Amino acid sequence: MKIGTDGVLLGAWISIKNSPFSILDIGAGTGIIALQLAQRSNAEMIDAIEIDENAYEQCVDNFENSPWGDRLFCYHASLEEFVEEIEEKYDIIISNPPFYSEDYKTSNESRDVARFSDALPFDELIESASQLLSDEGIFAVIIPRKEEENFIKMASEVNLFPNRICRVRGNENSEEKRSMLEFSFEKISIKIENLTIETSRHDYTEEYKNLVQDFYLKM
């Protein structure tokens, strides 16, 4: 699977100021977010969950071929199975969840699983994160901007409250397409940020380059 901008953005943006010991990437895909956090942090335990077999195998390969293989582990499981089995609590839980809720399906089933929200409903993601998160932990996601209000409302029902929000647009003239959200069990004043990716096609803003340049060979 290709590496998308959403995952790279989220992996670069999430705060690691609390020096996490343990990190969980839900729906890891190629493992890009877990790899970014291995590069950015000294976390000793970085786990990932991936249900799709091909993506899981690719994720394991990427972990093993990285400089941080001894800290990375991918589980081939559903989120429901993982929650039932695991007693660990994580200091960071991060997810770039599938959120294409359009009614059509393509003929490529694994691509559909990756893209459609019925593969990982938001309410299940939020509920599971609340059970797996340490008391002082951070739960972070990237979702469509139009889902932001509803996602925050669902999270509040399990005592997860937004601490940081970053709204992302492609260029200065386009509408906000994505929201990156950081939640914790602590209710504090919300820090609102805005990010524009490009000034024109493939001409990236300084703000975007500063955020993600550590993860690209050419930027």
Image (tube, helix red, strand yellow):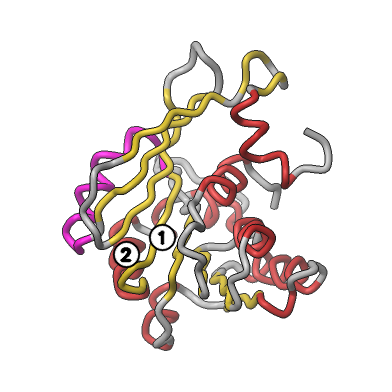
Q: Secondary structure at mark 2?
A: helix
Residue position for label 2: 124
Amino acid beneath label 2: Glu
What range is drawn magenta here? Answer: 143-159
The residue singled out by tag 1 in the image is: 120
- Badge 2: residue crowd in 10 Å (few <14, some 14–19, many ≥20): few
Seen at 33% across and 54% down, the residue is: 183
Three-letter code for the amino acid on which mark 1 is drawn: Leu
At which x and y percent is residue 172? 51, 14
Please say whether residue 156 is visible from this viewpoint. Answer: yes
Q: Position of residue 149 (x, y in %)?
A: 25, 39
Q: Can I make out residue 30 in this image?
A: no
Could you say where residue 6 lies in the image, as x and y percent from the top left? 56, 42
Circles 2 and 1, Cβ within 8 Å, touching? The answer is yes
Above or below, 172 against 113 in this view is above
Residue at screen point 34% across, 68% down:
136
